[in-house]
Image (spheres, rainbow, N blue to C red):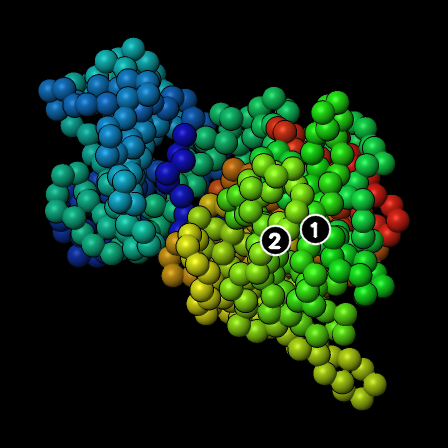
Amino acid sequence: MLSFIGSSGRAFEALGREGFEVARGEVATRFPDSFKKRKTASACHESVALPFKAAVDSGKDPVGLLSLSLGKKVDSFEVVEFGATPDDKKSELHFVKLGSEVFPIQADADLWGKKSLTIYEPRPISNLKRKAIEQDGIAGFYGQKAEVRSITLFRDKGPTTHVQFDDQEVDKDLSYGWALWEVASSVLRRADRGKDGFGVGSAAALPSASSAPSVLGSLSSILNQSGKTEALGPPRGHDLLFAGAWRGRPLAITSYRDGQHKIAVAVQEKTPSGKLAWIDLALPDSKSVPVRGASAAIVGDELHIFGGLDAEGESLRSHFVLDLAAAHKSGWAGDLFESAQALEDGLAWPVVAATKKETLVLGGVGKFWIEGKKKVANHRRGMAAAPKGGSYWWQKKSHAPADVTNAPSAVGRDAVFVGPGTNRDGKVFAYDTEAGGEWVKLPELPQKIGLGQLHVVGETLVHSGGFKENGDPCRAIYSLDLAAPDPGWKKLGESDVVQGRAKLVESHGRMVALLVNGDQRATFYPA
């Protein structure tokens, strides 16, 4: 449900409490004075928008009562059928209970990225008769001859919102429309999450492993440390630089603390006997292979490794690519890595994120210089992007709003989320990839931490592990509700499994935790 109605552009303001409050207030204050003289517009505002705002203001959690897909029209009424969707359009009809009344909201999207939300005036819950709705669509809720007011909101790929009152002419680019869209889409997502077991209005409510078999589904076991820890981790190195998974196989990049050995890359594979084992992957014999400070991302069937420092401490422009599918076919043997389009400047510990359209490399340390007896790093904030497919070429884009050296990142909801890095200041940002590259500051984590890990799971952003301001490992797991007006991060609990630079990766349908710390290496498998 609601897989195609998301936030973009100015919509990211609604991720924080302040932004949502702005939108909710503008539902009333941004209705144009000139529209008050228009009979239809005024009637729709009073019958739909104001009752909707009042219901949201009541503080009652939205409850999704019924959600159906729309099929073809018959006698001007929609016939509602499960799974029926036009070839060029996705349509869903949702009945959401807010307080004592039910608001029907229709969500539409076409193949070209245009989206719309239609909010209908409310009725008591007694009007909700499933069979009548299945037979007559929206008319089954109101009655065949009822005159019903509605407001339809239109969006293309950006945040600009157009408004239509009933079947009148469309009014373009209204702040009033933006506000209604933000409130309505937030209500829909919260109602959807409640049905799926995430708990309406409470990001801290954990689902069972069966209802969410990925990150959140494993957190209960991780928080309780119910499972098993095996002394089976990436075989080489002292620190875990990167951990990911390709087709369920954990993949890790580690570095040595002596600053002389090159980074190590390993993948976990099942042996013929069915046991799990780590396999070292051979790197090129080149001075461009870093010894530490490299960043990486899995892009489709490719592993990309960017930058880092060489043995002399100089930042590298290097970019290595591993074709994972071909490497797997060869038994992970032979010359696997190839050099690709280098970065324009040498970088160490940059943020690397792979979106649907491009690979982003952001921030990091450029060059070092000596100031007195102290070695000073030149922290960069610039971003370069390379489109997916074909040859890599780099295009300069936005600048980060803060130092993001060695910061964790996660991709989801048409955004790149960037957490606190070496600064350990607890700051979190979102970069909107769909509406021109807008940066938005999200609520700060409850404590000054950094160097942890981020995950996007549905409408929830999860931060785990890292280090505190004083350098001690952090054991906490926090969640941030991205869909609803939330005052900030909620602490889910603590676990030794995620502390420090430990990483959670998805392996064959469940999350496992990898730990490399000096000579200590282990893998935790949740129960």
Image position, residue 485 (x, y; %): 50, 45
Image position, residue 21 (x, y; %): 45, 51
Image position, residue 266 (x, y; %): 71, 45
SS for dot 2? strand
SS for dot 1? loop
Quarter of the rendering containing residue 294? bottom right
The answer to whether 288 appears left or right of 198 in the picture is right
Image position, residue 301 (x, y; %): 53, 43
- Residue at 70 percent of width and 74 percent of height: 314
- Residue at 64 percent of width and 58 percent of height: 295
Q: How many numbered marks are there?
A: 2
Q: Quadrant of the C terminus?
A: top right
Q: Nearer the viewer, residue 231 or 326?
A: 326
The answer to whether 520 appears left or right of 412 in the picture is right
- Label at residue 332: none
Residue extending furthest top? 131
Instruction: State whether residue 80 appears in this view.
Output: yes
Mark 1 vs 2: CB contact within 8 A: yes
Relative to residue 67, is residue 323 depicted above or below? below
- Label at residue 337: 2
> Which residue was labeled with disc 1?
282
